[in-house]
Amino acid sequence: MSLPVRVRFAPSPTGFLHVGGARTALFNWLYARHTGGKFILRIEDTDKARNTVEAVQVIYDGLKWLGLDWDEGPGVGGDCGPYFQSERDAVYQKYLDKLLAAGAVYEDEKKAVRFKGPRKLIVMEDLVCGRVEVDRSKPINPLGDMEPDMTIRRPDGSWIFHFVNVVDDIEMGITHVIRGEDHLSNTPKHIEIYQALGVTPPQFAHIPLILNRSGGKMSKRDQGASVQQYIDEGYAPESVANYLCLLGWSPKDNREKLPMEEVVSLFELDKINRRNAAFDTDKCFWLNGQYIHEMTLERFRALCMPVMERAGLPIGGFSNDYLDHVLASVKEKIKLLKDVPAWTAYFFTDDFAFDEEAVNKTLRAGGAAARLTQLASHLETLPAESWEPVALESAFKALSAEAGVKTALFIHPARVAASGRSVGPSLYHMLAILGRDKVLARLRAAAAK
Ligand code: GLU
């Protein structure tokens, strides 16, 4: 019988959560949820200089935003803590003592502790990459140089990644190490440490790299590389999480929009693609639009409210019903949540911005003022209870027939007068939501200006 799955995400706090790291976290989380195992968060903060509270917070915020909850780790606790490497010195010392007792390490002339490389053939059965053989008994160059013995503790007492990473995976009972392919070349070294400690290594699954537009490894500088960017630009977290699933994994039926519960039920490590994954910002953007269009109004409201509040819109003074009508009117048009305030401000304040170009084109056009006055007088004849889209449309049509002009000559100035913009929800819906008093006042104010 196999052990219950325990996987971990082990980021080093750099002040930045890269989409590659987020994807690694996601695949670990998916595997834990798929198998009913545990997902552990461990902070690899041995580099004291880069180790700040803010840098760790960025990781928590990004994971929480993506919906990747951890079962053990900072803020949650667990039996294998502390979950910060900077607090695990005693554990590492204990394992160093074991290696000393086994004669597997020595101190060099500079007082660094080095691991005596066994220099043997290492064979790994990677769950994604397949069988990988690295012959460590061979020289690393034509001059016949052998790889130097790896340092595991520096003269200043600080620990080297390879050692503490292995010790923690042992101590935390990790069964599967799922990490980026950039770590594949480290794994033989890690296996040597496991062997020296007499411990069976976990299973490894090295997931393909993410490539940028020009085919290079996606770096910090590439567009779309930081999870924070998606938060700031108003992506829906479920669309970004969905997009990350597709970077190296697919459901085999070409579907792209998949609810996370379904990915959880389908996710298997041996279905991870071996080929590198190309990052496509356009596809992520497209997927976000799909999610926004198809999500429930309730979900859309939950995502929009904080964005609107941050933009200073006084939404608190309006009923939920009004808010829902407003949001329903723009939901099909919005691609990014950050656009919601500009698309809806005029529903909540009379002090909204006028788009200069729209004003010049429609309100300053010859005859526009007279038509707005005419329109206001005509709409005033509509009783308040008939102030709804169908009746408004008929009123616009009747007026333009009477005036002998195209309806567009009333529609465009009315839209700009009521909203300050040339694009927005369907005009009759917009006027219906705004209500009779506001609309009549705005048409007249624009005519007067
Ligand atoms: N701290 C390492 C990193 O951020 C973790 C590697 C691993 O998952 O083993 O790349």
Image: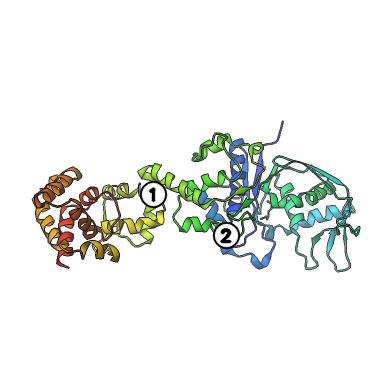
* Residue 91 appears in the rendering: no
The numbered mark at residue 302 is: 1
**Up-down relation of residue 353 to residue 71 (above or below):** below
* Quadrant assignment, res 275: top right
Q: Amino acid at mark 2?
A: Asp
Q: Which residue is mark 2?
A: 222
Element under disc 1: helix
Q: Nearer the viewer, mark 2 or mark 1?
A: 2
Q: Quadrant of the N terminus?
A: top right
Query: Which percent across, then down, holds residue 31?
Result: 62, 40
Find residue 186 and report its horizontal and vertical position in percent. Answer: 76, 52
The amino acid marked with disc number 1 is Ala
User: What residue lies at 12% left-to-right and 60% top-to-bottom?
Assistant: 373
Pick whichever, 420 or 438, lies toward us. Answer: 420
Measuring 39% from the left and 49% from the top, which residue is drawn there? 302
Q: Colour mode? A: rainbow
How crowded pointer 1 is (Cα within 10 Å; few <14, some 14-19, many 20+) is rated as few
What is the secondary structure assignment of the residue under circle 2?
A: loop
Say which label, 2 or 1, has the lower sequence index. Answer: 2
Relative image position of residue 278 (x, y in whole percent)? 59, 49
Residue 236 visible in the snapshot? yes
Q: Quadrant of residue 16?
A: bottom right
| Left or right, residue 427 beside residue 135 | left
Image location of residue 265, percent across then percent down:
56, 34
Q: Which mark is residue 343?
A: none
Label 2, ligand 1: CB separation under 8 Å: no
